């Protein structure tokens, strides 16, 4: 971690503490409610997002509803996104989607848990929108020249999730087995889901 990043983290920590203490003091929230909220967030992992993706691969009706209204569709799987508007964007052979939050670090935490540090970095936030292909190449994802890249800028009340393409050679797998192939990075759009051949 760079010195600048460490300083940013420290400032964010102090700001969070001051803000939280003020809210507790004013009776807006309780310490217990804050702890419960933090604990709840730690139960969220990319496995949830992977379940959603695998279900969409197996159930065309679910996939259609997911692309139409992400928040409602994930609710069918018992995943609550509260007031967030979840927008699921589908990768196709002609279109690749990438998500970013240029302003801060908005991320589909309800489905992926905490974002990786690089997602919050100024470099990713500024470059993903300016030169997405170069950024993807640095992640090892080289897209064909004819493929469209669409970058989605998240906001405080709108989060995106990428629906990656189902890899070839997965016909014999169950939905749960397919879910195990789906990575966090593939749902952010900086990776593809590897074919079974590469995983084994
Ligand atoms: Fe943000």
Image (tube, rainbow, N blue to C red):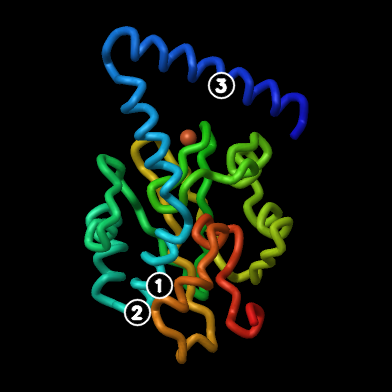
Residue 42 or residue 16, whichever sits in front: 42
Q: Is residue 27 above or below residue 152?
A: above
Secondary structure type for disc 3:
helix
Q: Is mark 2 within 8 Å of ligand 1?
A: no
Q: CA distance from mark 1 to mark 2?
A: 6 Å
Secondary structure type for disc 2:
helix
In the image, 99: left or right of 40? right
Q: Which mark is residue 13?
A: 3
Q: Residue at x 54, y 37 (%)?
A: 102
The quadrant the N terminus occupies is top right
Mark 2 or 3, nearer chain start: 3
Q: Residue at x 65, y 34 (%)?
A: 122
The quadrant the C terminus occupies is bottom right
Secondary structure type for disc 1:
helix
Q: Nearer the viewer, mark 1 or mark 3?
A: 3
Mark 1 or 3, nearer chain start: 3
Q: Is mark 1 within 8 Å of ligand 1?
A: no
Q: Hey, which residue is sitting farthest front in the picture? A: 32
In the image, 80: left or right of 123? left
Question: In which quarter of the view is residue 143 placed?
Answer: bottom right
Q: CA distance from mark 2 to mark 3?
A: 42 Å
To which residue does mark 1 refer?
Answer: 54
**Where is residue 3 drawn, in percent x and y?**
77, 25
To which residue does mark 2 refer?
Answer: 58
């Amino acid at each position: 971690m760079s010195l600048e990043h460490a300083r940013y983290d420290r400032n964010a920590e102090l700001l969070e503490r001051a803000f939280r203490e003020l809210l507790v003091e004013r009776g807006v929230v309780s310490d217990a409610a804050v702890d419960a909220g933090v604990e709840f967030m730690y139960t969220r992992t990319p496995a949830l997002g992977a379940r959603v993706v695998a279900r969409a691969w197996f159930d065309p009706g679910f996939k259609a509803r997911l692309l139409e209204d992400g928040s409602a569709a994930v609710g069918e799987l018992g995943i609550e996104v509260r007031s967030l508007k979840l927008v699921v964007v589908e990768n196709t052979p002609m279109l690749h989607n990438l998500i970013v939050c240029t302003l801060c670090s908005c991320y589909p935490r309800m489905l992926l848990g905490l974002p990786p540090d690089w997602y919050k970095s100024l470099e990713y936030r500024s470059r993903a929108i300016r030169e997405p292909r170069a950024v993807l190449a640095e992640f090892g994802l080289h897209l064909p020249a004819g493929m469209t890249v669409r970058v989605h800028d998240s906001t405080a009340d709108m989060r995106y999730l990428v629906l990656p393409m189902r890899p070839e050679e997965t016909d014999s797998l169950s939905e749960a087995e397919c879910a195990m192939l789906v990575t966090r990075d593939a749902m952010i759009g900086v990776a593809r889901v590897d074919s079974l051949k590469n995983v084994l």
